[in-house]
């Protein structure tokens, strides 16, 4: 459907780095409607031409395209982009903006269908929504209107609720699209397919066969230029509350009736509501670990500690490592521990889910190494996207010695494996009105309900240690203590089939 995307915060980093390249790829892949306009809006006083130069014609984020495509092709794309200066403040009269939208809409026949994309700090969401509403730009009589908001969606349960009510004063829930870019990743969506399109997995997906579940999200980068934001946020807010709990909900949820957005989201909310909320200090103490990277050398290069990073308080206790053990109070998952960790400055960038199956009820053959003993299903979210099953095979020769073997699938081996980048997929969905991969208000609030007590406890209690870990390592020394019995974290390598602890020495 013909439409216009109005991006607030258009002179910011996200627009140039993610949004415009995603829209460009949609254009290249012929997914854009015939009549399509991007209107950037923010507080910089620049012209249409300057905006086009910045985010397209001279953009480092489109460099390989600029080098390889015909100039005409690039120019046809950049001519779809326009810019409107909002003045000094987002909370101002939108008269001029509204006139500009109407003019562009008439000239380019975008049929009054608008997406307002808010790539601004959340503190501006309500003001922007109100100003749009004052101009009549939220009414859907003559065309649809949608609003897309970026994370962080709130700082706590209370602030998330305020944001929700703030937006819902001006838009219906159906018009609101809360983006979580992890849901745009093919491999995250594949969690649903792995579970619900295979009769070999779903029957085992419960407490009878699963011993525990482990999710690792590791990044090699530190806080880069975002120290100011990150120091007020920390790993739990930045990654766990949003991306990781989204992954958790897809693993925990019950089968939806069908693949409609509301059916899937209903099940996800139920899943998040069934996470056991930790309330007393002892439980919180025993089931959470926070850490912070300290200066170290990686590949011979000196790397700063977190407290030395730009924008970070030199006495900061903000966590760059967070690990949480929790249980899910429902029929399917009773007593099965979930271990989830996320951190910056780890040895490799990787996100994966490991389903550890129970040892067969009766053991006929002796197997020794506990970490290598049971069946595992490893779902690799990134990189080297794929699925790995570890199962027992007989070692050739006398007796019944059992070894683990790998059965692996890689996305890259699919013919025509053109994996859409997360933003591309999500934008296209919003353009088509499909909210399946967007978080609903109650979902976000359920996630905060689980996270809030942990954050409060970490902030409140002086017994909570922030453990240091050298940049480039797998986190604090005591991180394995969180895991019951003799199990440890599977510290994954760069490649899906690498065994735990595998590393490349450069
Ligand atoms: C963002 C976080 O939401 O996700 C960043 O704010 C983090 O701190 C990023 O680096 C990770 O995304 P990805 O897609 O690179 O795993």
Image (cartoon, rainbow, N blue to C red):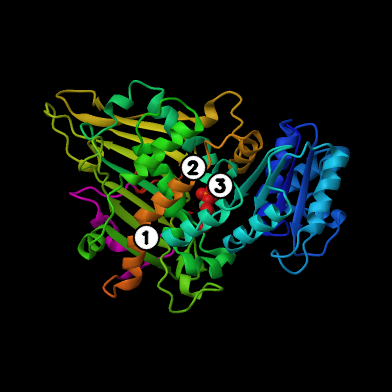
Give me the C-alpha separation between circle 1 and circle 3.
21 Å
In the displayed structure, does residue 401 sit left or right of residue 375? left
The quarter of the picture where residue 13 lies is: bottom right
Q: Residues within 10 Å of mark 2 (few under 14, many from 20)?
A: some
The quarter of the picture where residue 329 lies is: top left
Name the residue carrying label 3. 179
Q: With respect to residue 282, does 372 lie above or below?
A: above
In the displayed structure, does residue 49 sit left or right of residue 366? right
Segment colored magenta: 465-490
Give me the C-alpha separation between circle 3 and circle 2.
19 Å
For discs 1 and 2, the disc positioned in front in the rendered view: 1
Residue 416, position in %: x, y?
Answer: 61, 25
Q: Tell me the tag on residue 452.
A: 1
Residue 54, position in %: x, y?
Answer: 79, 56
**Label 2: which secondary element:** strand
The disc, 1 or 3, on the residue closer to the chain's N-terminal end is 3
Q: Which residue is found at the position 44% from the left and 47% from the top? A: 442
For discs 3 and 2, the disc positioned in front in the rendered view: 3
**Label 3: which secondary element:** loop
Q: Which residue is found at the position 49% from the left and 38% from the top? A: 384
Residue 279, position in %: x, y?
Answer: 25, 60
Residue 480, position in %: x, y?
Answer: 27, 55
Do tag 1 and tag 2 residues touch (Cβ < 8 Å)? no
The disc, 1 or 2, on the residue closer to the chain's N-terminal end is 2
Q: Tell me the tag on residue 382.
A: 2
């Amino acid at each position: 459907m013909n439409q216009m995307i109005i991006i607030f915060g258009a002179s910011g980093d996200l627009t140039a780095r993610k949004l415009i390249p995603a829209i460009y790829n949609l254009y290249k892949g012929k997914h854009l409607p015939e009549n399509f306009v991007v209107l950037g809006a923010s507080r910089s006083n620049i012209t249409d031409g300057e905006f086009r130069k910045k985010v397209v014609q001279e953009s480092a984020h489109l460099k390989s395209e600029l080098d390889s495509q015909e100039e005409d092709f690039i120019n046809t794309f950049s001519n779809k982009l326009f810019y409107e200066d909002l003045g000094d403040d987002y909370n101002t009269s939108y008269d001029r903006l509204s006139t500009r939208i109407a003019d562009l809409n008439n000239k380019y026949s975008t049929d009054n269908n608008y997406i307002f994309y808010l790539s601004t700090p959340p503190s501006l969401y309500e003001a922007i929504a109100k100003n749009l509403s004052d101009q009549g730009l939220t009414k859907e009589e003559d065309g649809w209107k949608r609003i897309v908001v970026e994370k962080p969606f709130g700082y706590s349960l209370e602030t998330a609720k305020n944001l929700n009510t703030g937006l819902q004063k001006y838009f219906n829930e159906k018009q609101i699209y809360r983006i979580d870019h992890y849901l745009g990743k093919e491999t995250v969506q594949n969690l649903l397919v792995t579970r619900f399109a295979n009769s070999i997995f779903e029957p085992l997906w419960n407490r009878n066969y699963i011993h525990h579940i482990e999710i690792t999200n590791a990044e090699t980068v530190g806080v880069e230029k975002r120290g100011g934001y990150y120091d007020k946020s920390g790993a739990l807010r930045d990654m766990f509350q949003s991306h990781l709990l989204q992954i958790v909900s897809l693993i925990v949820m019950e089968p939806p009736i069908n693949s409609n957005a509301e059916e899937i989201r209903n099940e996800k909310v139920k899943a998040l509501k069934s996470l056991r909320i930790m309330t007393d200090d002892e439980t919180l103490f025993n089931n959470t670990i926070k850490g912070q990277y300290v200066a170290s050398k990686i590949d011979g290069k000196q790397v700063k500690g977190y407290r030395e990073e730009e924008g970070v308080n030199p006495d900061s206790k903000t966590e760059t490592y967070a690990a949480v053990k929790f249980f899910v109070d429902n029929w399917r998952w009773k007593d099965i521990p979930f271990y989830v960790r996320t951190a910056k400055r780890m040895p490799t960038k990787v996100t994966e889910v490991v389903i550890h199956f129970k040892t067969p009820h009766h053991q006929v053959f002796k197997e020794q190494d506990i970490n290598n003993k049971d069946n595992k299903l490893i779902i690799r979210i990134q990189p080297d996207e794929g699925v790995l099953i570890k199962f027992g095979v007989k070692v050739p020769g006398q007796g019944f010695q059992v070894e683990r073997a790998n059965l692996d699938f890689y996305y890259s081996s699919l013919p025509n494996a053109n994996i859409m980048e997360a933003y591309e997929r999500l934008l296209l969905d919003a353009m088509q009105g499909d909210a399946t991969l967007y978080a609903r208000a109650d979902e976000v609030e359920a996630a905060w309900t689980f996270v809030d007590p942990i954050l409060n406890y970490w902030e409140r209690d002086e017994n909570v240690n922030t453990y240091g870990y050298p940049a480039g390592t797998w986190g604090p020394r005591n991180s394995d203590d969180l895991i019951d019995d003799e199990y440890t974290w599977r510290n994954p390598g760069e490649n899906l089939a690498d065994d735990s602890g595998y590393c490349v020495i450069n």
